[in-house]
Amino acid sequence: MLYNLDCVDGSEKIIDDESVDLLIADPPYNLGFGGTKHTKTKKPRFNIIANDQLSHRNYQRFTFQWLRQAYRILKPGRHIYVCIDWRMYPYMALWMRRVGFVIKNCITWNKVHMGMGHQYRFQHEFIIFAVKGEKARRIRSRSATDIWSIPRISGNKTIHPTEKPVEVMQKMILNSSEPGEMVVDFFSGSGPVAEAVIRSGRELTAFEIDPHWYEVSKQRIEAVQQELREEGADL
Ligand SMILES: C[S@@+](CC[C@H](N)C(=O)[O-])C[C@H]1O[C@@H](n2cnc3c(N)ncnc32)[C@H](O)[C@@H]1O
């Protein structure tokens, strides 16, 4: 189920304590990013996403709010993945620990193709992998490493300013949940987590605060469900 709600209020109202098997969060990084620029006008292709241009203090407050909800709803031993980049990593890791999460690793997403940046072009982001409590569930793959080389979606093909490939989300879901389990996405954007959850036979609860991105995610979910129905899946 996808909700056009703030993930903090929404999860508080809708999701019971310790009822979630996996939580995925690709939050605003507070970098005020409007996506790649149009070649001709040099203007950003998108508006800045919600909660991506806050004072540091307000960003910290907002992050603590959703992290506390994430901690409350996750079952003990279950995993949380939080996407972040090198600029905000130190804060996010600290704040996650303060809320109670035990950080197990930091995955490097190697985007394969270079992006922006002046002093060395950017080609990676981080994904913090953490657990609620000391007794962590094992990831399903025994040979998975903490470097994921998955090509980014090229700037002119993205439909959301900070869009991630569905394969990145799929890896988290397949490694950290079983079929039929509940996966929660706090920041749906264009809906790659939703797509990966549906394709892998898990249950979805997702939030997106912006009506436009909510609609984009909703349409993506409907298209994937339609595709799977045509293939004969029992949804
Ligand atoms: C980094 S983007 C996620 C992009 C997504 N992973 C994708 O690949 O399309 C963060 C998204 O969270 C949304 N958002 C910001 N604050 C939110 C909140 N409090 N609750 C729910 N969604 C929020 C933004 O509108 C934005 O679409």
Image (spheres, helix red, strand yellow):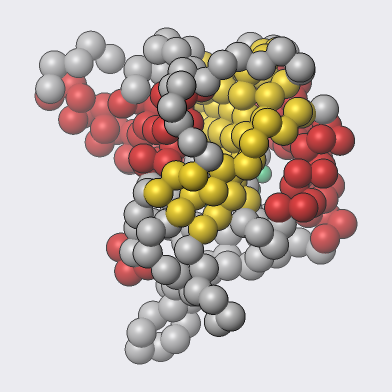
Q: Is residue 83 visible?
A: yes
Residue 223 lies in quadrant: top left
Q: Position of residue 60 (x, y in %)?
A: 82, 50
Q: Position of residue 122 (x, y in %)?
A: 51, 68
Q: Position of residue 153 (x, y in %)?
A: 35, 58
| In-front residue for pair 212/191 | 191
Q: Which quarter of the figure is the C terminus placed in?
A: top left
Residue 11 lies in quadrant: top right
| In-front residue for pair 191/132 | 132
Q: Residue at x 40, y 49 (%)?
A: 149
Q: Is residue 12 left or right of residue 210?
A: right
Q: Residue at x 32, y 69 (%)?
A: 156
Q: Residue at x 47, y 82 (%)?
A: 43
Instruction: Determine whether 199 is above or below 215 in the image.
Output: above
Instruction: Determine whether 127 is above or below 72 in the image.
Output: below
Q: Residue at x 37, y 49 (%)?
A: 150
| In-front residue for pair 62/74 | 74
User: In the image as oriented, which residue stretches furthest toward the bottom?
Assistant: 40
Q: Position of residue 106 (x, y in %)?
A: 63, 42
| In-front residue for pair 140/4 | 140
Q: Is residue 203 left or right of residue 69?
A: left
